[in-house]
Amino acid sequence: MNGPYKPGTPCWIDLMVPDQQAAIDFYCDLFGWQGEVGPAEQGGYAVCTLRGRPVAGIMRAMNPDGTVPDPVPPTAWTTYLSTDDIDSTVKSVMDNGGTIMAGPMDVMDLGRMVVLADPAGALLGLWQSGTFDGAGMVNEHGALTWNELVTPDLPAASAFYSSILPVTTARSEMAGAEGHIVYQVDGRAVAGIMDSSELPQGTRPNWRPSFHVDSVDDIQAAAVRAGGSVQRPAFDMAAGRMAVLADPQGGAFAVITPSPRQQPA
């Protein structure tokens, strides 16, 4: 990826964990990333890279004043959607039933961000780029390839996101995924919306990242050897082969090897 992402497109992901170094070690070993704890003036935020390009952030769970929160929030990945006017988007979020959790705030000269919850409670971020556009590599082994919103009310989610960003939604035409919603920017599918009723009872609304891998089965086995767990074992579907995993601290993510016809152009 070169240049800013179009508004509405997932552009970055980061992970908040109790043990930052352990998470860095896990994902670097699993996906071939490079990463280290960042400088103190940046809260130790680690920007992990793949072949020299940024792919994800990992940070220690902490309060704004640097203290450890009590209780520590659950380990979770956050998806950031691109916007070219974060303050205007924040107003739309509040006007349409969303809740601002943190920000908006400037991140040095890198950009401007906010963390929010949609009306169903799914957390996500918004990012307005400055000198940093977001993920510099996607759709290759170890890099982000898809983001899926899990929510109990697909029509409500479609209406909310369409009202805050220049996106459209449509029912998936893919065999076996007819109940899913495809989230589009300029007519191109960039994310999906999935009914949480298809998942185990108690699954909370969330945005889940998926990473492109050369072999789902090999990554699944490697994650387990490293102390991770399997939430849904590797399975075949129309889009390819997929597994839903969790890191040793509970952060859920998916890995997918797209079928040849689903490979990005």
Image (tube, rainbow, N blue to C red):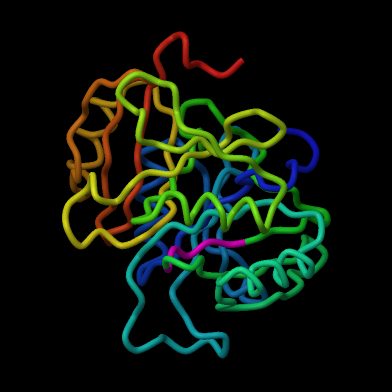
Q: Nearer the viewer, residue 157 or 22?
A: 157
Rendered residue at 34%/28% (across/down) = 177
Q: Is residue 162 above or below residue 44?
A: above
Quarter where residue 116 is shown: bottom right
Q: Position of residue 258 (x, y in %)?
A: 41, 20
Residue sticking out furthest to the top: 260
Q: Relative to residue 3, is residue 136 drawn left or right?
A: left
Quarter where residue 102 is shown: bottom right
Q: Quadrant of the C terminus?
A: top right
Q: Position of residue 199 (x, y in %)?
A: 22, 48
Q: Nearer the viewer, residue 137 or 263?
A: 263
Rendered residue at 29%/21% (across/down) = 237
Q: Which residues are magenta?
A: 121-125
Q: Nearer the viewer, residue 38 or 75?
A: 75
Rendered residue at 17%/52% (across/down) = 200
Q: Relative to residue 39, is residue 194 drawn left or right?
A: left
Q: Quadrant of the N terminus?
A: top right
Rendered residue at 61%/68% (across/down) = 96
Q: Nearer the viewer, residue 25 or 80?
A: 80
